[in-house]
Image (cartoon, rainbow, N blue to C red):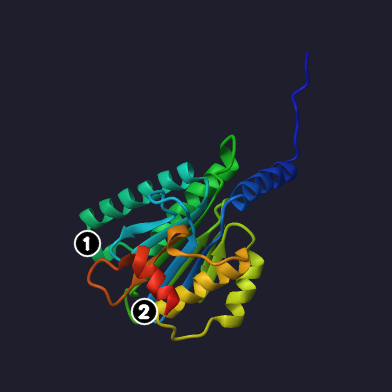
Amino acid sequence: MAANYYVAPEQLMKDRAEYARKGIARGRPLVAVEFANGVVFAGENPTASLYKTSEIYDRIGFAAVGRYNEYESLRVAGIRLADVKGYQYAREDVSAKPLANAYSQALGASFMGDSKPLEVELLIAQVDGDGPDEPPIELYHILYDGSIVDEHRFVVIGGDTEPLTTALEAQWSAGLGRDEAVRLAVGVLAESAGRELRADGLEVSGLDATRERRRFFRLRGTELDELLDA
């Protein structure tokens, strides 16, 4: 009679974490930078329709790196969750924190219980706090194992994050305008890649609190190239 194969829990968790990290690192990094009225997402993306970033709800944005099919299913689930809550209660009751917690629980459950962990990292952002005690910009970074971090100023996910974080630490300043934040984000990505980045190889989007009800925006094509050349 064959003996059951045993793996120590510590080793199993270590192997799962290494597997997820390697899968995520194969993709290109994505940068989020806060500016005076919102947050900008920027990353290399040569495809024209497979987005890493999108709108979840009126003032909530989503960004991800890793396996596209896995984070796309999470994005769709988040939109449905937000829509149901907005329909049952009010649009103003839909906020980033409960959504980030739901993503954290889903990723944590997958990491602990599925045959393999999800190879994704997520960012959930919100502009316009709910009240005087709420920050005007919220950024939640959710890792492959369900860990959640409340980020501020800027954050880098996926790929080799250390040089990008160091560059942002040296160059970021409070009160940036939207266009300045875009140029900063793209500039550090170009510096890390060692080449010039243009609109046809970039995905740039974000949330701007000065817009009407739907805060999400996307920059592309000639508009983005002109902004980068300014």
> In the displayed structure, would residue 132 be above or below residue 23?
below
Q: Is residue 135 visible?
A: no
- Indicate the position of residue 165 as horizontal and vertical percent values: 61, 71
Please identify the quadrant where the N terminus is shown: top right
Q: CA distance from mark 1 to mark 2?
A: 24 Å
Q: Residues within 10 Å of mark 2 (few under 14, many from 20)?
A: some
* Numbered badge on residue 90: 1
Q: Secondary structure at mark 1?
A: loop
At label 2, which amino acid type do we have? Asn
Q: Secondary structure at mark 2?
A: loop
- The answer to which of 215 and 217 lies nearer the viewer is 217
> Which quarter of the picture shows residue 177?
bottom left
Q: Earlier in the sequence, mark 1 or mark 2?
A: 2
75 displayed left or right of 26: left
* Numbered badge on residue 37: 2
141 displayed left or right of 56: right
Camera-nearest label, 1 or 2: 2
- The answer to which of 99 and 68 lies nearer the viewer is 68
Query: Which residue is at 74% across, 43% downward?
Result: 11
- Indicate the position of residue 73 as horizontal and vertical percent values: 41, 44
- Indicate the position of residue 109 as horizontal and vertical percent values: 53, 44
Is the residue under label 2 in contact with that under label 1 (CB below 8 Å)?
no
- The answer to which of 31 and 188 lies nearer the viewer is 188
> In the displayed structure, would residue 127 be above or below residue 27?
below
At label 1, which amino acid type do we have? Ala
> Which quarter of the picture shows residue 138?
bottom left
Query: Which residue is at 64% across, 74% downward?
Result: 166
Q: Is residue 105 visible?
A: yes
Please identify the quadrant where the C terminus is shown: bottom left
